[in-house]
Structures are given as C-alpha cells and as structure tokens.
Amino acid sequence: MLTINHYIKAKTLEEAYELNQARNARIMGGMMWMRLGNAKVQTIIDISGLGLDQIEETEHVFRIGAMCSLRQLELHEGLKEMYGDAIAESVRHIVGVQFRNQATVGGSIYGRFGFSDVLTCLLALDTFVELYDGGTIRLSEFVNKKRDKDILVSIIIRKSDRKLRYSSVRRTKTDFPVLSCAVVTGPVHGKETWYFSVGARPMKAAVLEKEWEIPEDLKEEELAGYAKEAAAGFTYGTNMRGSAGYRRHLAEVLILRAMRSILADRTQEGK
Amino acid sequence: MEVKFILNGKQACVEAAGDTILLDVLRELGCHSVKCGCETTNCGLCTVWIDGKSRLSCSILAASVEGQEVTTLEGVKEEAEEFGTFLANEGAEQCGFCSPGFIMNVLSMVRELEDPDTEEIKEYLAGNLCRCTGYMGQLRAIRKYLQWKKEEVRS
Amino acid sequence: MRVVNQPVPKVDSQALVTGKGVYTDDLAPADCLIVKVLRSPHAHALIKDINLTRAEAVPGIECILTYKDCPDRRFTMAGQTYPEPSPYDRLILEQRVRFVGDAVAIIAGESKEAVSKAMKLIKVKYEVLEPVLDFRKAKDNPVLVHPEENWKSLCPVGADNKRNLCAHEEDSQGDIEAVLADCEYVIDRTYHTKANQQAMMETFRTCTYLDTYGRLNILSSTQIPFHVRRILATALDVPKSKIRVIKPRIGGGFGAKQTVVTEVYPALVTWKTGKPAKIIYTREESFIASSPRHEMEVHVRVGADKAGIIKGIDVYTLSNTGAFGEHGPTTVGLSGHKSIPLYGKAEAFRFVYDVVYTNVMSAGAYRGYGATQGIFAVESAVNELAAKLGMDPVTLRELNMVKEGQKMPAYYGETANSCALDRCLKRAKEMIDWDNKYPCRDMGNGKVRGVGVAMAMQGSGISAVDTASVGIRVNDDGFYSLMIGATDMGTGCDTILAQMAAECLECELEDIIVHGVDTDSSPYDCGSYASSTTYVTGMAVVKTCETLREKICARGAAYLGCSLEDVEFDGEKVLDLKNGRSISRADIGNRVMCNNEQALYASEAFTSPVSPPPFMVGMAEVEIDKETGQLELIDYAAVVDCGTVVNPNLARIQTEGGIAQGIGMALYEDIVYNEKGKNYSNSFMQYKIPSRLDVGDIWVEFESSYEPTGPFGAKSIGEIVINTPPPAIANAVQNATGVIVRELPIDAEKIYRGMR
C-alpha cells in the first residue's frame, strides 16, 4: 500500500525541484501507477498548478507539457494533422476515457514502463525531453538514463517531413500490449531514414535507426526481408501475455505492415 | 490537512491525510453512489467528474482536489433518473453496482460527443466494466436515450 | 397473460440507477471495526509460531485472532442444503495453510491504516511443506492436502482425504466399450478448462453486529442467507437461534457468493468483542482467496456410425477443487450429466470422475457449475467428429440432438418434457446465416471469417433437494406483502416473483411489495443458485397464491354472509354470484385487522422431483488474422428455450450477460499460477474480463417450449447461458483455420501456433 505523509502543491518549478531533492519525495503525475506500489513517500509534490498541461505548437515543434493528459494527446488537432491517426492510436486503447483524462504524458514517459504505448510511439519520432535541471535531451537518451531527482517539464517533438505508423497487439482491446510498434520514416540530412520502435517486448521500448532507401514498388518478399531485419534488431522475452518467439513474429508482421502502409501512402502522394 | 472543494454544487471541507483517496472521502460525505470495484483503475465504478471531466476517484488524492468542482451521481440526480429510466426499461441496470460510474461517464459522453455512433459509444465507455449485462442492453438504452434527447431538442 | 411475460422494469431499479446506498458497505454502521486477514505466502506450510506483540501494540487495534482462538469444529463454506455433499474440511483459521493466500490471522481495528500497520508487524514462522500443485498428480500423491483425522465427509461421494480425493463416482448405461468398438468413427480427445473468476463488480463483503437481543446479526452480500446462518452456527459453535442474516442488494454473484467466503471473519470478531465489524475484500483478495470455477480436464470419446448417428459417449473428468472441497463433489457431476444427454440416440454412455485436492485456492460455484466445462469438451468433441465425418456440424446435431418426449438416461433418467432445442438450432442458423457462411470466408485482406456452433443444457434447481417457501400477506387497503427467501443478486427475482404473484392474484404489480431476505422473518429458501429461483421459488409463489385466493374467498364469503361455494375472487373483489353483492379486496384487508381470528396470510413450500433442463444453441462468427492469429468476435447468435419467458427484458439481459462471461472464458480469462503456487491473476489488470469492445454483437432470441411442471411453463435461464461460447467459438476457429484449440482460453498465440 502506498503511504504519503505530506502533500504539497508546488507554486513554482523551482520549489518543486527543491522539494524533490529529499530522499523520499516524489513528483506526482496522474497517480495511476504510483498508487499501485508500496512506496513510503514522505512528500508528494503536485505540479499540476504550474501550467504544464498545455500542448503548444510552434512552427518547428510540438511542446507537450508533462502534465498533459493522454486524452489531450489523443484529441490534439495539430498532432492529428501532422501524423494522421497514429498518435491517437497509440493511446486510445489505454483502459478508458476516465483513465486517459487522468494519466499524464509526463508520467508515462518518466516511468519508462515496458508496457508504455506512449513511449513506444514518441521514441520513433524526433522527440526530446526537457528536464528542469538536465536541460533538453533526446528521448532515446532519457529512456536509458539512470533515474534521478530531476523533473520532467515537457516533451518536445521536432516537426519534420516524417510519416508515422503505430500499431499494437493486445489480448483484450484495453489490455496492456502484447507488443507495440511504431515506424517512422523521413529524410534525415538528405538520406531516407527509418526509425523502428518496439515496446512491450515485454521490455521497454527501444529504437532502431536504418538508412534505407526503399523504392515504393519493391517486391513484397524483399520488403519482408527489411521487416525481418528490423525485428531482429530487438530482443524479446516471455511473460503471461506472450512468448518471446511469438513477440518476435508479431514485431515482423507489424513492422512490415507499417512499412507497406507508409510506402503505399507515398505512392499515392507520388501520383 | 484541510481540503476545501465544491461537491455537487456545495462547499465541502474535509480533513485529509497525504494519502487519503478521494473515493473514501466522497463515501464518508454520504455519496454512496461512488463505488470501488478494483483499486487498479480498470473498472470505472468510481467515476466522478473533476471540473466537469470524467475521472477515477480511486486514484485521486483528496488533497489534490482543493478548489476544484467534484460531481458525483448525487449531483446530477435528475439526469441520472432520466437516463436511468431508459436503462431500467431494458433491465440493463441488473445488479446496479456499476451503474453510477457508468451513468456518470454516459452523461460525460453526451456532453463531449455530438451524436456518437455505436463504435464511438463503445470506445468512450470502454473503461466502464460490467459483469452482468454483456453490454448490449446498456447500448440499447443509450441509443434510445440519445434519440429521445434529439426529439426533446427538436420539440 | 397480463403481467407474466411482460418486460416490466425491476422493482428496485430507481434506487439502483440513482446510486442509493443499498448495498452492504453502504448500510454498515459507521463505527464498524475494520477487519482484514493476514494471508499465507506459502502454498503449503505449518505455522510454527505467531508473534503478535508488536502488532497488538499498534494504537487502534482491537484484536488479532489466530488458529488458537478458533473452534476446532470442521465445516464447509459451501452454501448447500444440509447434509452438504462438500466435505467438512475447514476451520476458520488453522495451523496448516494450504494455498498462497490462505488465512493466517484475523486483525480488527478502528481504521484501515491501523489494521494495515499491524498486519505488517505480525511475525509468523512457517515450516514450509512441499505443495501439490499439479492436479494431474494429486490423486494418491504422498503429499496430503488434508491429512487431519477430523476431516469428515457427510455424504457418500467417494471422498478419501488420505488419497487427496474429494469425490469419485462412476455412472453408465449399456456397454460403452462394445458400442465404441462397433463405431465407424471415434473421436478420442482431452480438453482442458482453467479456473475462472466470477468477477462480480461488488467484491465479497460482510458486516456484523450484535442487536438489541444480543444476537449476532450478519449483513452480507450472499446468495444463501439461510445456509450462512447454519454454517456460521457450526463454524462459531453457537446456536442457530443466536444468528440472523440479512441480505441487502447485491452487486452480482454468479455463484461466487454461494460460498461463505467472508462471513466467518467479522462474525468471529463481533462474537468475541461484542463490537460491530466489517470486512470488505479488495479486488486482489477476491482474486486470490475466493471461490472460482473448478479447473477440469475432460477426456471424451464419442463414437458414430457411417451415417453420423452418435452411438456412444464416454466422459472422464478430472476436477481440481483446490485446497478445500467447496462444491467439489457436485460441480463435477454436471460435466457429464449435462453434456451427454444432449445427444438422444446414444445407446451407451459412461461417466467417471475424480475430484482432487491441490494447494491452490479452493474452487467454488460459478454459473454453469461444471456443465460449462463438460459442454466445452463434449461439444468440441462432437465438432471434431463432424470434421472427421466431413459433415456440417449443424447437420450432425440435427441428426442426433435430444427431442421433446425423449428419456435422457445420462440425466438421471428424466424425460425431456419440454424441449425446443430443434427450433433453437433452426433459428440460430438463420440468425447467423449459417448456410452462406459455413465453414469460412476469406475476406481478402489477410483475414478469414468462420462460424461455429454449440448446444447446451442445464437444470432448473436440484431435484428433490432444493426447497423454497413463500409467504403472502394481505394488508390494509388490500396490498400484498410477498415474503421470499430467494436472493435477488441483481438478476431480478424480486421482480419476476412479484410478476408471478400479480398474475396469480389478478392485481397490478404495484399492489405487491417484495421484502428482501432476512432469516428472522423471511420464509425458508435454500437460496439463489442451481438455476432454481424462477422454477422452484416460482412454483412456491404459484402454490401460495392458490392457497391465499381460497382464504380471500373464505373471508369475503364470511363478510358477505354467503357460502364459499357462491363466491368468486376476480382480483379486485369477492363477488357473491347469486346476488351480485361484493366486497373489495381493500375492504377485506381492512376488516381482517379488527375482530378477526384468521390471519389472511398464506405460505407454501415447493420442492421438485425433477429438474427440467432449459436448452440453448449458440453460434459464433469470428474473424482471424492469418498472420498474427488475432481473433475478433464478430457476432454471437443465441436462441434459448427457457420455457415460458417470465420477463423478456430480464431474460434477454441474463442471456447476453451469460454469453459475455462465456466469451471471456473462451478468449481472455485465465488464472495463472507460478511454479510456487502464487496467483499472478490478482487484479483486473492481469485477469481480463471482457470490456464492451471485446464481445462483438450478441443477438438473442427465445424459442419457448412449455414446461408442465414449472410456473406458467417456465424453466430456468440463469446458468445455461454461459455454456455455449467456449465450444462455439472454438468451432468457429476450427472452421476458419483448421486449428483446434483444446485448452482455454483460445488466445492469438495458440491460434498462430496452430496455423504454423
């Protein structure tokens, strides 16, 4: 059972950061996951009053405040325009509307959970996290960074000409994923680059980068070869929801479908 | 600590510890409609509105609702009776234990979505589990209720 | 009929939809002690020492009870009629713990926080013993789950605790070996169904207090108030007269609450301390220490001749009752007795079973009660037979299904007096468009759709055991009080029994008030289980109304000053047919309250020598992703013969709800233990019941037969409705992909592996 001695609603980020340096202090996200644990928290710090619940769109980036709910992410028009339904697809299977009104993007990312759809999805994009003390670093770096007492302030997605596909396999429609998969492609420094992010393997999502020039009319078997190679770039494990072998197979299938869909899209645009 | 918030339109003031859960506070304040079904945010029985949005009161610290508006089924009694009649006319309240949380989210859906289709209804309410009905009767009730509301507006 | 067969809303519906505080925890006194149970971390162990010193010192702790504080009287928590077939193998707390989650100590205190704190401070030393975790190796295992000498079986069910056997029986007719040897086609397969959780939304809970008379009052979410009274008297070693059980509204039961899961704990606390107490199980406790479905492995042999006539069925069931024998000896019987009789042309059958003890949580009663497991096996075997014969599985059933008027040797020799199974099959086939969809259709997008079929039956009460009594009183102004002991758990029995009474008494539903169950004042009823309420209690209502009508006529005649032969009661008034004079029901009601020596009250009991089976056909259409094995349930069509439908809305919801639970069992729900016996499926995060996105579209119709022994021709509906989805969905997968999954749940990975 989670126990909390003190609750403090921070008035500034600075105050929140100072309070959080105590050993048993914790920053509060949506309270979805923390409540399930057995932590003994001396001070819980609520940062919901600091205006971090906005998605700000500029010419170059989307800046998603750490306290934005998953529901905000799901409904955001700008993200939809840029990435189609993919962002919404990455969160709409998560439990239910009430849950998504409450769970925060910051909490999902900060937790670096194995099952995280949000992490899987954002990892494939050109995403950064803004930390109060640690500055702005790549999400892919943050994922593997040791847990510390810093505060995640916002998540920044750099806009660029990229296509995103997100898919997952689940035992029931609102369960944790058996496997989650995001595929992104676009030109990077003039070279066509593919990003593959696979999560819930059941380990947390990791991202793979490939400079692959793939013609739209590539034969299906050859495309399958690429997908196989991408899927082989990850390790897989077994738990209640699926075996390692099945997960590897799912990764191949989902990656192939995403690539096929992106290429078809491009063919369409070419016409 | 002392927490002040608006409960169903009236000022409420409670003493809460750091880890006091809103669900427990609401029940102690006599809002018996708010039920606990799972403790793991999966079932939707404890659904209330915080500043008008459906949320899960089993996972909200009481301290954090300071200054906010909390609405339970007791606070929307008239609408609950209206929709509840459609539900009862299908026999779809059954044991009734999930009904309050479910109705809160239905009323939230009605406010948020304009003329939702079946898939949208199912998706919006996916976080409300029910073990009695198989969900079909609830769906029939919602469709009839939406139809009735449309006709109300027209007339 | 005016009231029966009408879709009236439930009499308690307005309270439920407005969230009134009508459930156990809503009604519990505010000053209740909070009761929690410390649970064993080991699957099998002996408690060597319990140190309570630090725990008892926690401020606010009232008492901590251990096995040393409990009577040494074994009992069963199974809510069954005395003498229970379930063995007396429990103590409230015991030195030996038999599963991860078994009760070790009871802690009562003023607050949740104090109790939780104290629980952490209790120091227990265990001698860890080897557990029996594989139910296939339990029988005659050198490790005994119940080695104790005072273990007791009250009924001859073939139990032997020195062999880990909770029950064993053999039943047969004809020479099954000879018949199968003569068959052209024999299917010989083993099927495995896992334990499943009822997962009613309201977890187990009980509140207890002493009343004005110093008696122990039990306010509990239970299906079996009268059994609770008896079981608690035994467990606590107090006279039954000292106990009163009250059943408020219940947030679902589905059989879970046919076991006394929580009652003993606060009852012991209140009895020892004199203070009110309550226990509210967390969802985790409800998942790790409750009363789930019995895991069963069912070996089926089905033989048919060249023409597809099923000649013989042989079933062997191995059932896992877990640490205790609740419902162990009885559930297993249904796995054969309610599956084999579906086929009316068999010349021989055999049904043998073993029920074994293991060191996992005790099983209990869950809707379907063994029939679900047996029907999955037998119906799946018949579907495999159809494939072997190259025959449409619907055609095979048309050839073989039991028909009205047939004797059913495997169903205790009862005759199917009412059976519309043939019409159910015909209609279900139309609803799903079987002829155009069987066996499968490639959708051209990497997906294939297939259809599948299954039949089912159940009973209506336990013949010659279940007993219901009903009382009806005429009050002033002539309104009626209907007193029942049957327990509405959301199903609507308060309503349908009132409908029957209103029909019999020719009055409006509003003229009847229904009283919830209170063992002090309600007439005896064994409780709501075994699909008994509509049929058994319903007949008690009909009988009571007949008697009451006679009494009303007699009073009316006396007040009119005429002879009984001359009067008629039309529901509103008693009329003297000779002179047209009448006295209204209201006037009679008022007059009997003054200067009257005869209570205007009737009470009758009913028990049935037979248990007429309802019948049903379910058909599923599924879509399967050929690459991933992912399954999407598209449609589920079901047609039920429950005799006369008493309330079409409530019967429909029962059916849809039961089917959704069956879908959960077929596709998603699984209780997973680790190698040490720890239950991983301990929350709704891990034990996945279907959401509204997981059940496809469920379509329900009724094809009614008329059951001559039932009220208005009605039979039961509550349980049968869960039985068809597992075999029908398995068959749809088989027809779509050729993959036959014989172990539930049917998940994507199993289908994928089958396709490889």
Image (cartoon, rainbow, N blue to C red):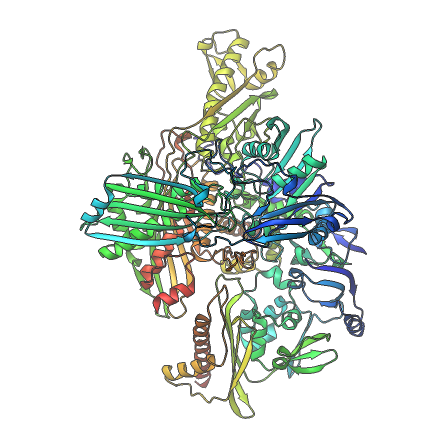
Q: Looking at the picture, how far across and down is residue C705, in whole percent?
A: 34, 36
Give the mark count: 0
User: Is the residue C754 above or below the residue A196 in the image?
Assistant: above
Image-based side of A59 in relation to A200, left or right: right
Q: Looking at the picture, how far across and down is residue A163, in whole percent?
A: 52, 81
Q: Nearer the viewer, residue C578 or A242?
A: A242
| Residue at position x 46%, y 71% in the image | A244
Quadrant placement of the C terminus of chain A: bottom left
Q: Looking at the picture, how far across and down is residue C648, in whole percent?
A: 45, 40
User: Is the residue C226 above or below the residue C318 in the image?
Assistant: above
Residue C16, located in which quarter of the rendered image? Answer: top right
User: Is the residue A178 above or below the residue C307 in the image?
Assistant: below
Residue C609, located in which quarter of the rendered image? Answer: top left
Image-based side of C419 in relation to C721, left or right: left
Q: Looking at the picture, how far across and down is residue C622, in whole percent?
A: 38, 59
Q: Nearer the viewer, residue A252 or C500?
A: A252
Whether residue B151 is visible here, answered yes or no, is: no
Whether residue A58 is visible here, answered yes or no, is: yes
Name the outermost residue toward the bottom: A190
Q: Which of C343 and C615 is in front in this view?
A: C343
Quadrant placement of the N terminus of chain A: bottom right
Q: Which of A132 and C128 is in front in this view?
A: C128
